[in-house]
Amino acid sequence: MNSISNSLSGIQAAFRRQEVSAHNVANINSEGYKSRSLQQVESKAGGTEIAGQTISDKIGSPTGSNVDLAGELVGQMQNKHAVELNVAALKTSNEMLGELLDLTG
């Protein structure tokens, strides 16, 4: 069952990163807005968790924010792939558990 909780924690972390990235992109033209990012760490119980959020101190444009649109788009693609990979791992765990139950039943 640990593999299931590991995959679920990875999916949740990817969704949280996606939320923060979407917020950054939505505020790309907001004067003085500073981009945010999340710190993802390995959980002591296994899987992953969000350890905190940081606000960038990069200098942005004088009339807007410091959001790097290209970087945000790459991050969003990485989040999408992280969800896809964790869903695939969930499916594999489910199939293995089903086969194990078939063998014991």
Image (cartoon, rainbow, N blue to C red):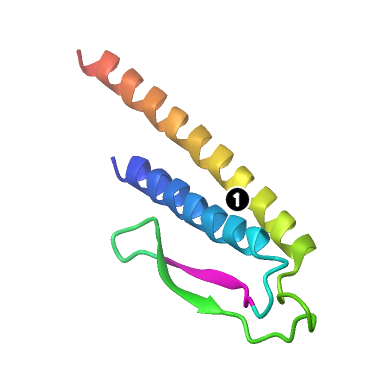
Nearer to us in this view, 100 or 88: 88
Drawn side of residue 23 relative to residue 53, left or right = right
Per the image, label 1 sits on a secondary structure element best described as helix
In the rendered view of the protein, which quadrant contains the C terminus? top left
Given the image, on which type of amino acid does mark 1 rest?
Asn
Magenta residue span: 33-41
Q: x and y percent of residue 67 in the render?
A: 71, 70
Q: x and y percent of residue 71 in the render?
A: 74, 64
> Residue under circle 1?
79
Quarter of the image for residue 44 reads: bottom left
Q: Is residue 40 magenta?
A: yes
Nearer to us in this view, 101 or 48: 48
Nearer to us in this view, 74 or 99: 74
**Residue at horizontal 34 percent and vertical 57 percent from the top:** 46
Q: Where is 30 relative to 92, above or below?
A: below
Q: Is residue 32 magenta?
A: no
Drawn side of residue 7 relative to residue 2, left or right = right
**Residue at horizontal 37 percent and vertical 27 percent from the top:** 94
Q: Residue furthest left?
A: 105
**Residue at horizontal 64 percent and vertical 58 percent from the top:** 26
In the rendered view of the protein, which quadrant contains the N terminus? top left
Quarter of the image for residue 41 reads: bottom left
Q: x and y percent of residue 35 in the render?
A: 62, 73
Please name the predominant secondary structure of the magenta segment in the image: strand
Q: Where is 101 relative to 15, above or below?
A: above
Q: x and y percent of residue 36 in the render?
A: 57, 72
